[in-house]
Each structure stands twice: as structure tokens, then as C-alpha cells.
Amino acid sequence: MKGKIALVLAALIGGCGIFGGAELAGAETLVTHRIPAALALEAVGEAVAACAKQGYAETAVLVDADGVRQAVLRGDGTGVHSLDSAFSKAYTSATLKANTLVVIERTKEDPLMVPSIAKLPNMILNGGGVVIELNDEVIGAIGAAGAPGGELDEACAKAGLDKILSRLKQ
């Protein structure tokens, strides 16, 4: 048995075997960018504050490129359901690499997207999710929920993004 394992490992290291001749990328790494925690907190704070100035109780959630929560702020008087809604908007934007209002427009051209998206956990087709890009790389998203309409939620999320955008660096 040990001989077979050694043979498989030797084949893999040699660049052939079960991976169809693919070379192992042992010396390479993937370069990704992350939003610093302090900026993430500023973004959700600004999103909530922007909506509060308009009289809306808002929750904002910022996720990284993988859709993992990084910063959350539930504004005063905001319903508990807004925590899940804001997260789902941010998650949808990050994983589909587009603002949720853009995704909604795409579903009008391709209605089969709706049942596909609806089956996936944490996905939502409501406005308020805004993708965060650095150059052409999606590095996260911010979602906002609580205002009376997706366009208003998106405006608050964009206010949060605008607060930090100039300080995101490669």
C-alpha cells in the first residue's frame, strides 16, 4: 500500500496522474485584497447615518469577496429582519459580482435566473446590495436594508461605499 501511495505522489509531483497532466502550482499563490476592518466599520456607519438623515431606520452589512460578514451595524429602531436582509443583499452582490439592482435587471432578460437564485442560500433579489471593486477585482460588497424601497437602500449602501472608496488601495 505504501508503495502505491508513493507512486501516486511521485506521479503528481511529476505533473501527471489523476489531474490529467496538470502541473502543480506549488510556488504560486493567489493575490487577493481585503477591506481593512476600520474602513469596513466606517462604511456601515456611513450607510446607516445616511439613511437616518432621511428618516429611515437602516441596517448595513459589509462582506468580503467570499461573502463573509466583516462589519454589521443595526441602526436605531431597525427591525430585526433587516440584519438578514442586509446580509443577503451584500452576499448576493459579492457572489454575483454585481449590484442587486443590476441583477434584478438581468433577471428580466433571463427569467430562468430567478428560480436558480431563489434555491441558493442567502441570495435575495431586492435592491440595496452594492459591489465593492478595486481596479477590476471584486473585494467585497455592502448591503443595506430598512428604507422603504430597494433604490433607497442602494443609495444608503453607496453612501457607505463612497465614504471609504478613495482610501482603498492595491
Image: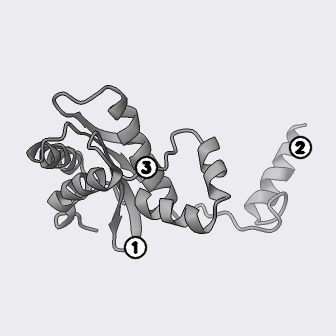
Q: How far, Cα to Cα, is label 3 from label 1?
A: 24 Å
Residue 126 placement (x, y as % from top left): 43, 49
Q: How far, Cα to Cα, is label 3 from label 2?
A: 56 Å
Does residue 77 appear to the left or right of 8 in the view shown? left
The N terminus - image quarter: top right
Residue 88 figure quarter: top left
Point 28% across, 68% down: residue:
170
State how many labels appear.
3
Considering every residue shown, the one lying at the far front of the view is: 148
Does residue 143 appear to the left or right of 47 in the view shown? right
Residue 130 placement (x, y as % from top left): 35, 57
Residue 168 visible in rendering: yes
Q: Nearer the viewer, residue 5 or 98?
A: 98
Residue type, mark 2 in image: Gly
Q: How far, Cα to Cα, is label 2 from label 1?
A: 47 Å
Considering every residue shown, the one lying at the far bottom of the view is: 135
Disc 3 target residue = 126
Residue type, mark 1 in image: Asp
Disc 1 target residue = 136
Point 66% across, 50% down: residue:
116
Mark 3: which secondary structure? loop
Q: Earlier in the sequence, mark 3 or mark 2?
A: 2
Could you tell me if the residues under marks 3 and 2 are in contact, i.e. CB atoms within 8 Å? no
